[in-house]
Each structure stands twice: as C-alpha cells, then as structure tokens.
Amino acid sequence: MKKKKRIFRLIAILSFALLSIYSFSNEPYSFLNTSHSPKKYFSIYIMDQGQSTALDFSTMLLFYNPNLDSSVVESIVNTYIYESQKEGVNQDIAFIQMCLETGFLTYTGSVKSHQNNFAGLGAVNNKASGEYFPDVQTGVRAHIQHLKAYASTHDLFHELVDDRFRFVKRGIAPTIYDLTGKWATDKDYAIKLENLLSRLFLIRNQSDFQETSDIF
C-alpha cells in the first residue's frame, strides 16, 4: 500500500513538472471572448460549470502536499465535485479556494484539520479558530453554500448547514475578483485565486494531452 502511494505521488509530481514543456492559452474566460472552448479557458465565474476532474484535483493537492493520504484526498475532491455540482457552483473555484484557505490542507493557520472547515469560515483573524463541522461532507457543503451566498440569489439545493450564510449580502460577488474585500481583506486575494486557477488549468490540459497521446 505504501509503495502504491509513493508511485501515485511520483506520477503526480512528474505530471505537474511536465507542464512547462507545453504551451497553452490560460486567459480567464469572459463573456466578451466567446471563442474559448471549455478546454481552452478557466472560468472566473463562481456560478459556472467547472471543467476539472477528480484526478486533476488530486494531482494538484499531492504535488503541493505529498504527505497527504491518497484516500483522504479522494474523499475530499469527490465531495467538492458532488457538492459544487448540486448547487451550480464552479467546482474549480471552490477547490482552489480550499487550497488557498488551508494551504493545500497543511493548516498552518488558526484553523486545524479536525474542524473540517475548508474555507476558513468564522476565522476572521489570526486568533479566531473559526467554525467546526462534524465531517468532511458537512464542511465542504458549508463552503459551497457560503460561496453561493456571495455569487447568487438562487435558493440552496441542500438544507442550510452554513451558520454564517445569513451574514452575506446575496449575489455581491459573481466572480473571483469580487471576493477581494468581501470574503477576505487581503488585497491580493483574487490574484492568488486566479494564479491557482491557472495552475489547475495547466494540469487539466496536461491530462488531456496525455490522453490524446495514448491514442497513437
């Protein structure tokens, strides 16, 4: 089992390292540039259909945090995809925001892993530990609901589990750029999210390239 994990992590690292060999467009999608296909853009709209797969997410997480247990990674990434799709939230944005907020699940801030708080909900400063959730699915669901509160005025699909949902003015942040100064005070917050989306985009395209290459 340990040998299997080491092999998987090595593949993840090598795949990510190969990204620099290939050149892909990574311009953020906008309604003014409709020539982009899903394979050629990453969307900055929170209420949108994400394009990345569980494998893309796992590759990124294990590259930046190779100490993670692969079964834990699988559980978290699949939950993000499921919960995002149910609420109509862009799974790519939800996932990379989790990566940013938790430091790729290293939890070096005031929020700790046992809290299942993947978005720093309630951690308003360096001393506040934030919200606690009973399990991974509830924690991910709360994150997705909080994102939807910012980006949309539509009703929730699932029963509300995000206690801080009521504090958000609905629909004030349709894109990642609108989160700066609202979700976080960090003036570079949106830039950091865009950077992570760009990296995820490259991973996705690298996966597509490998699948195409296997045909020949």
Image (cartoon, grey):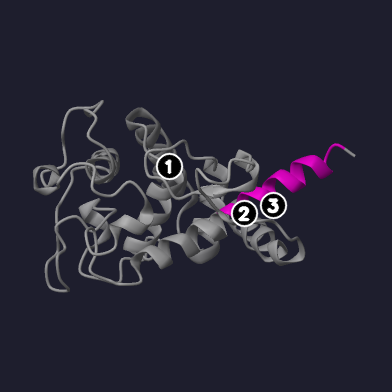
**Given contact means CB atoms under 8 Å apart, are the residues at marks 1 and 3 in contact?**
no
SS of the residue under disc 2? helix
* Count of numbered circles on the image: 3
Q: Give the mark nearer the N terminus: 1 vs 3.
A: 1
Q: Which amino acid type is marked by label 1?
A: Gln
The residue depicted at 14 percent of the width and 64 percent of the height is 129
Along the line of sight, which residue is nearer the eye, 212 or 4?
A: 212
**Given contact means CB atoms under 8 Å apart, are the residues at marks 2 and 1 in contact?**
no
- For the magenta stretch, what is the residue range? 201-215
Please give the label number shown on residue 206: 3
Please give the label number shown on residue 20: none
| Residue 202 coordinates in the image, percent (x, y) | 62, 56
| Prevalent SS, magenta region | helix
Along the line of sight, which residue is nearer the eye, 183 or 54?
A: 183
Mark 2, residue position: 203
Kindly give the residue lying farthest to the front in the view shown. Answer: 32
| Residue 99 coordinates in the image, percent (x, y) | 40, 59
**Given contact means CB atoms under 8 Å apart, are the residues at marks 3 and 2 in contact?**
yes
